[in-house]
Amino acid sequence: MGRIVLRLDVIRPSPGMAVTARAIEMRSAGIDVVGSSAGEPDCATPPRIAAAVRAKG
């Protein structure tokens, strides 16, 4: 078990999660931040893009 724990120390957060964490810190400090690095989009995927993904699929 100890070896697994030691290995976890070298894992770094993904860039997207690091950006999200920084946005949270900035909001906590009262800075107005628009976070767009992670999460669900608030708009639908344009039909031409969805069609292209299905065609490639």
Image: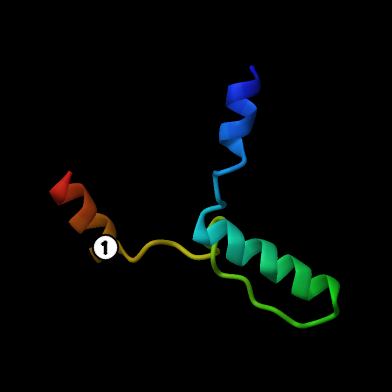
Front-most of residues 36 and 48 = 36
Residue 26, percent from left and from top: 76, 75
Rendered location of residue 47, percent (x, y): 29, 62
Which image quarter: residue 27?
bottom right
Q: Position of 51 compared to 24: left or right?
A: left
Amino acid at pointer 1? Ile
- Give coordinates of residue 38: x percent, y percent: 55, 59
* Side of 20 where 55 appears, left or right: left
Which image quadrant: the N terminus?
A: top right
Q: Residue at x 56, y 69 (%)?
A: 36
**Left or right of 46 in this view: 21:** right
Looking at the image, which residue is at 62% across and 71% down?
Answer: 35
Residue for badge 1: 49
User: Which element carries disc 1, helix, strand or loop?
Assistant: helix
Q: Quadrant of the C terminus?
A: top left
Going 14% across and 49% down the picture, which residue do you hit? 56
Residue 9, image x, y percentages: 62, 41
Q: Camera-side residue: 43 or 56? A: 56
Figure quadrant of residue 10: top right
Is 5 above or below relative to 22?
above
Number of numbered discs overlaid on the protein picture = 1
Instruction: Using residue 53 as the reference point, say whether residue 18 is left or right of it.
Output: right
Name the residue: 64% across, 77% down. Answer: 34
Nearest to the observer: residue 48 or residue 16:
16
